[in-house]
Image (spheres, grey):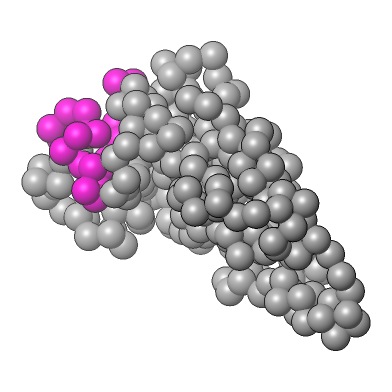
C-alpha cells in the first residue's frame, strides 16, 4: 500500500525485484485497489432537499472572510518547488503562512504570526480567509492529498497547480482555482483580489455543493475488493513495481 508520491517513497522500492508484488493499493486510479485520500459523490434528490448549504449559510460565512489566502506548511523544500510558487504569488496577493516554513515563506511582516492581533488560532484563520494554497509537494498523476479535501469542506477555495489532475479525479470543475489557468502569477493575484472584493463572484465557487457532496468520512472499498479477490482466488502480478510506480509519473520542476 503506497499513499505517498513517488518522490517520497524512498530508495527501498528501487531494490524490489520484478514480480515481487501481486497488486497495488494506492491513490492512483489505475491501481488494482483504488484508495484515494477523498472523493465526491453526486447528490440524490433527497440529499438535494435536506443536505445542502443554504445561501443564507454561505452569506453568513463569507462575511467573516476578510482575508486572502492561507497555508499551513511544514515541508519547506519540495520536489514541486511549492515554496518558490508561494513566495512568487505572495508578491501579488496577501498569503498568511503558518507552520515551520513561516519565517522563510512569508512575504511582508503583516502576514507573520507575531503580527496577528485577532482570529489567530487555526479555526479562526480558516473562518476568516477565502482561499487555501493547496500546492502539493509533488506534481504527480492522480496525487491529491487529504489537505485538499479537508480545506474544500471548510468553505475555503483551494488553489492548485494543475487543473488536469483534479478534473481527472472527478473534482467538480468550479470548486477550485488552478494556477495553470493563468498566464502569470500576477494574473492569478488579480483574480484573487476580485474574488476577495466580490462576494457574488466568490460564492459561485460553492455552487457545486448543490450537485455534489464530499462525504465527511472516507468509505473506501479497496480492502473489501482485496478480500473478494482472495476469496475467489483471483491471481494478479506486477512485472516491475519501479516502472509502474515511478517512471513517468511525476512532473520535473
Q: Is residue 164 left or right of residue 226?
A: left
Q: Quick one: 253 or 236, which is closer to the camera?
A: 236
Q: Is residue 79 visible?
A: yes
The answer to whether 244 is drawn above or below residue 216 in the figure is: above
Does residue 52 belong to the magenta stretch?
no
State the image quarter where residue 36 is shown.
Answer: bottom right
Q: Is residue 123 left or right of residue 163?
A: left
State the image quarter where residue 69 is shown.
Answer: top left
Q: Quick one: 72 or 156, which is closer to the camera?
A: 72
The answer to whether 102 is drawn above or below residue 9 in the figure is: above
Q: Is residue 160 left or right of residue 128?
A: right
Q: Position of residue 191 (x, y in %)?
A: 48, 24
Q: Quick one: 78 or 235, which is closer to the camera?
A: 235
Q: Residue at x 68, y 42 (%)?
A: 243
Q: Residue at x 73, y 42 (%)?
A: 168
Q: Position of residue 141 (x, y in %)?
A: 65, 41
Q: Residue at x 44, y 29 (%)?
A: 192
What is the magenta range? 91-110
Q: Residue at x 53, y 32 (%)?
A: 161
Does residue 101 belong to the magenta stretch?
yes
Q: Position of residue 11 (x, y in %)?
A: 47, 48
Q: Quick one: 199 or 248, which is closer to the camera?
A: 248
Q: Position of residue 94 (x, y in %)?
A: 29, 31
Amino acid at each position: 500500500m503506497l499513499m505517498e508520491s513517488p518522490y517520497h517513497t524512498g530508495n527501498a522500492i528501487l531494490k524490489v525485484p520484478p514480480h515481487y508484488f501481486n497488486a497495488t493499493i494506492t491513490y492512483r486510479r489505475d491501481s488494482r485497489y483504488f484508495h484515494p485520500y477523498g472523493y465526491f459523490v453526486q447528490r440524490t434528490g433527497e440529499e438535494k432537499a435536506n443536505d445542502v448549504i443554504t445561501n443564507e449559510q454561505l452569506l453568513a460565512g463569507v462575511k467573516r472572510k476578510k482575508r486572502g489566502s492561507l497555508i499551513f506548511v511544514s515541508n519547506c523544500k519540495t520536489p514541486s518547488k511549492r515554496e518558490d510558487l508561494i513566495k512568487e504569488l505572495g508578491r501579488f496577493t496577501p498569503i498568511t503562512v503558518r507552520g515551520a516554513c513561516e519565517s522563510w515563506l512569508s512575504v511582508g511582516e503583516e502576514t507573520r504570526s507575531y503580527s496577528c492581533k485577532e482570529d489567530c488560532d487555526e479555526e479562526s484563520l480558516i473562518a476568516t480567509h477565502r482561499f487555501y494554497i493547496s500546492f502539493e509537494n509533488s506534481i504527480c498523476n492522480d496525487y491529491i492529498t487529504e489537505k485538499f479535501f479537508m480545506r474544500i469542506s471548510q468553505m475555503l477555495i483551494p488553489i492548485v497547480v494543475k487543473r488536469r489532475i483534479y478534473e481527472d479525479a472527478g473534482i467538480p470543475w468550479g470548486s477550485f482555482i488552478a494556477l495553470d489557468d493563468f498566464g502569470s502569477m500576477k494574473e492569478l493575484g488579480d483574480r484573487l483580489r476580485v474574488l476577495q472584493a466580490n462576494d457574488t463572484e466568490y460564492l459561485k465557487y460553492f455552487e457545486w455543493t448543490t450537485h455534489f457532496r464530499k462525504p465527511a468520512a472516507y468509505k473506501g472499498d479497496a480492502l473489501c475488493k482485496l478480500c473478494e479477490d482472495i476469496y475467489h482466488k483471483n491471481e494478479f502480478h506486477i512485472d516491475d513495481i519501479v516502472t509502474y510506480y515511478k517512471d513517468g509519473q511525476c512532473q520535473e520542476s
